[in-house]
Amino acid sequence: MVLENKVAVIYGAGGGIGGAVARAFAREGATVFLTGPHRASVDVVADEITAAGGSAVAAEVDATDEQSVDTHLQAVIDTAGHVDISFNAIGIPNASIVGVPLTELEIDQFAKPITTYVMSYFLTARLAARRMIPNRSGVIMTVTALLSRTGLPLVGGYGPAMAAKEALTRNLSAELAPHGIRVVGLRPQGMPETRTIRDAYEPRAKASGMTWEQWQELLASRTHPRRLMTLEEMAHVAAFVASDKASGLTGTTVNLTMGSLDD
Ligand SMILES: NC(=O)c1ccc[n+]([C@@H]2O[C@H](COP(=O)([O-])OP(=O)(O)OC[C@H]3O[C@@H](n4cnc5c(N)ncnc54)[C@H](OP(=O)(O)O)[C@@H]3O)[C@@H](O)[C@H]2O)c1
């Protein structure tokens, strides 16, 4: 188990990616502190992990609120003594941010993903780093999307938000790596088993006269293996990146687009 004795905090742990990462971290021996803005979805993941013999604690935390994140992190330190991994996997509903041409987009709608995603990542990373620096050890992680580096229509401020998170990953690493802290992002291809991808793409499939299955085949045809990634595959990589086996990896975003996006 590559994460034995590690303590991980996951933001957005009730979601598709956060939940899969939480399960993988716990399977690899980490104690996972799971957080989200609504307790119910986080409890489901925590109960699953506990039932499988893992160690998980759920809490209600708004990862865009400094006080909420700071109070929770202090409680983690008080309980577990240290924090080794911070993973920000929060997601806001796509329906509220995509689907409108840039020429028609209101400034608030454009700014929403940028302020929410970038500020939350900054906040959770900064507060974790303050606790990791005295131990000269830690890993800060997040998730972005292919739109950080690919131009697509009707995605509003989402692409700029993903690009900014990847820049922040590099800059955090430049400042924190000398203190023994690695900062690494993951950039998965869309995983159709998640509600995020279905919500974002099913209406577009319909508008183009395609079924959801045909749309998935189209997305899959752009990858080298001609299939889309599973949540479990992404989570395996997350566990490896969070582990000491990846000690040489920092200041970068791991490209998990399976050939859809060249380096
Ligand atoms: N799904 C994919 O295939 C994919 C691929 C590449 C990148 N991404 C990106 O990865 C991120 C997560 O995606 P996902 O599919 O896991 O989304 P998801 O299933 O919708 O999960 C997002 C989670 O974030 C939580 N959340 C929302 N606002 C929060 C806040 N202020 N503080 C703490 N937690 C908050 C949500 O809680 P509630 O539900 O309780 O509100 C939800 O549990 C998104 O940024 C998405 O764009 C996804």
Image: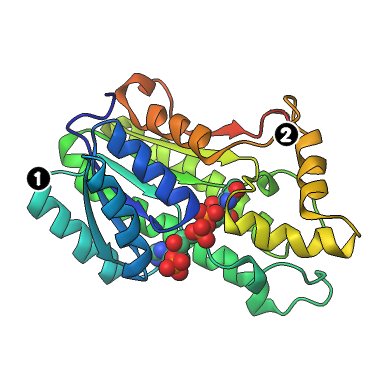
Q: Nearer the viewer, residue 95 or 182?
A: 95
Q: Is mark 1 within 8 Å of ligand 1?
A: no
Q: Nearer the viewer, residue 52 or 34?
A: 52
Percent of width and height locating residue 137: 23, 33
The colour mode here is: rainbow
Position of the N terminus by quadrant: top left
What is the three-letter code of the residue carrying label 1? Answer: Gly
What is the three-letter code of the residue carrying label 2? Answer: Leu
Percent of width and height locating residue 131: 20, 48
Q: CA distance from mark 1 to mark 2?
A: 40 Å
Res. 129 in view: no
Q: Is residue 179 above or below residue 202?
A: above
Badge 1 marks a residue whose secondary structure is loop
On residue 261, which mark appears? 2
On residue 81, which mark appears? 1
Position of the C terminus by quadrant: top right
Residue drawn 36% across and 71% down? 38
